[in-house]
Image (cartoon, helix red, strand yellow):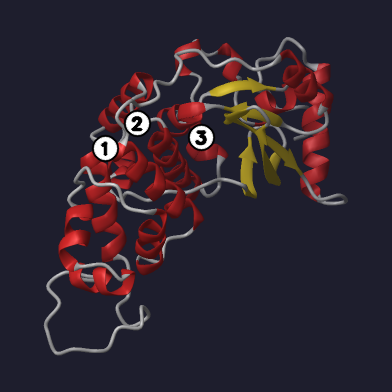
């Protein structure tokens, strides 16, 4: 992934999404040949010259100040994830020695113990490239048995797009798959030279037309909390809420913990799934067999 090209594409895409009227620009009689703002309008809103902004949008190796980056982000009405990604792109464009991501990510033993202690709630740890670094018993039963996959294939994004079962599992598959693409792009802004990330992008782009289309939109998304409604083959439909926790000492690792609201059918379903995994220890959670009566 060329950082210069990515910066240029991201700025152009962000500019095309801004409504000129909502941006507070006075109306003019010129015909707009493309949606969104013109370059000179972004420059006006950001308080820089049109030539300077044009060079930014071309991905030139210049070093804007923090104030200029903030001003451009304000002009483009970027959310927090977009602002983070923009800073990463500007930093990567001007960085002379880029940080090479290590090929192996390791989870501390204490975190494995923490996952196991959350036995009543599904929990997993994602690393760079959405790699699934660890998952407890209930998470493997709720989603899929990531531990059974070859290590190089334990990617949440890869699973989401290349395993047909996810389209049946997630009621709103398109929403979650698109969020997955945008989270992956945000991660690559911080690690643009990761060769394993380039391999993953090549694989997903080749094998999924939906991934190619959504990747071309240059959206970014930061998963911090939310909900997922699942249509589980063992316990039926349930909704889980998730919260994320970045691991102290390793910002590349994030723990996802899933809960259900007390007294709901979703809580009953999750409790049933937990009981099923205990009573059927020889069953592969990735291909579960429904319990009697369901």
Asked whether disc 3 touches disc 2, contact meaning CB atoms under 8 Å apart, the reply is no
Q: Residues within 10 Å of mark 3 (few under 14, many from 20)?
A: some
According to the image, label 1 marks what residue? 3
Residue 197 spot, x, y in % from top left: 37, 25
Which quarter of the image is occupied by the N terminus? top left
Frontmost of labels 3 and 1 is: 1
Alpha carbons under labels 2 and 1: distance apart = 7 Å
- Find numbered disc 2 in the image and state the secondary structure of the residue it sits on: loop
* Label number found at residue 192: 2
Name the residue at 88% across, 51% down. Answer: 263
* Label number found at residue 166: 3
- Find numbered disc 3 in the image and state the secondary structure of the residue it sits on: helix
Does 13 sit above or below residue 191?
below
Dot 3 or dot 1: first in sequence order is 1
- Find numbered disc 1 in the image and state the secondary structure of the residue it sits on: helix
Q: Which residue in the rendered view is the most extreme toward the right?
A: 263
Residue 182 occupies quadrant: top left
Asked whether disc 2 touches disc 1, contact meaning CB atoms under 8 Å apart, the reply is yes
Name the residue at 47% across, 46% down. Answer: 179
Asked if residue 42 shows in the view, the reply is yes
């Amino acid at each position: 992934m060329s950082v210069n090209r990515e910066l240029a594409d991201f700025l152009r895409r962000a500019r095309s999404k801004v409504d000129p009227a909502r941006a507070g620009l006075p109306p003019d009689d010129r015909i707009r040949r493309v949606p969104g703002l013109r370059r000179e309008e972004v420059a006006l809103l950001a308080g820089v010259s049109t030539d300077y902004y044009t060079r930014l949008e071309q991905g030139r190796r210049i070093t804007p100040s923090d104030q200029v980056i903030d001003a451009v982000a304000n002009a483009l009405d970027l959310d927090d994830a977009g602002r983070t990604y923009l800073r990463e792109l500007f930093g990567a464009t001007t960085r002379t020695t880029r940080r090479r991501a290590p090929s192996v990510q390791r989870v501390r033993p204490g975190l494995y113990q923490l996952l196991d202690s959350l036995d009543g709630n599904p929990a997993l740890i994602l690393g760079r490239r959405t790699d699934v670094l660890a998952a407890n018993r209930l998470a493997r039963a709720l989603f899929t048995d990531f531990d059974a996959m070859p290590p190089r294939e334990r990617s949440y994004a890869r699973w989401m797009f290349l395993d047909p079962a996810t389209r049946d599992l997630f009621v709103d598959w398109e929403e979650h798959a698109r969020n997955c693409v945008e989270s992956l792009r945000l991660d690559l802004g911080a690690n643009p030279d990761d060769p394993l990330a380039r391999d993953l992008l090549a694989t997903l782009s080749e094998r999924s037309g939906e991934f190619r289309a959504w990747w071309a939109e240059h959206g970014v998304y930061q998963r911090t909390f939310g909900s997922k409604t699942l249509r589980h083959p063992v316990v039926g439909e349930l909704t889980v809420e998730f919260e994320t926790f970045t691991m102290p000492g390793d910002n590349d690792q994030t723990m996802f913990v899933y809960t259900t609201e007390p007294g709901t059918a979703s809580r009953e379903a999750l409790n049933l799934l937990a009981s099923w995994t205990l009573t059927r220890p020889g069953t592969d959670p990735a291909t579960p067999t429904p319990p009697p009566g369901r």
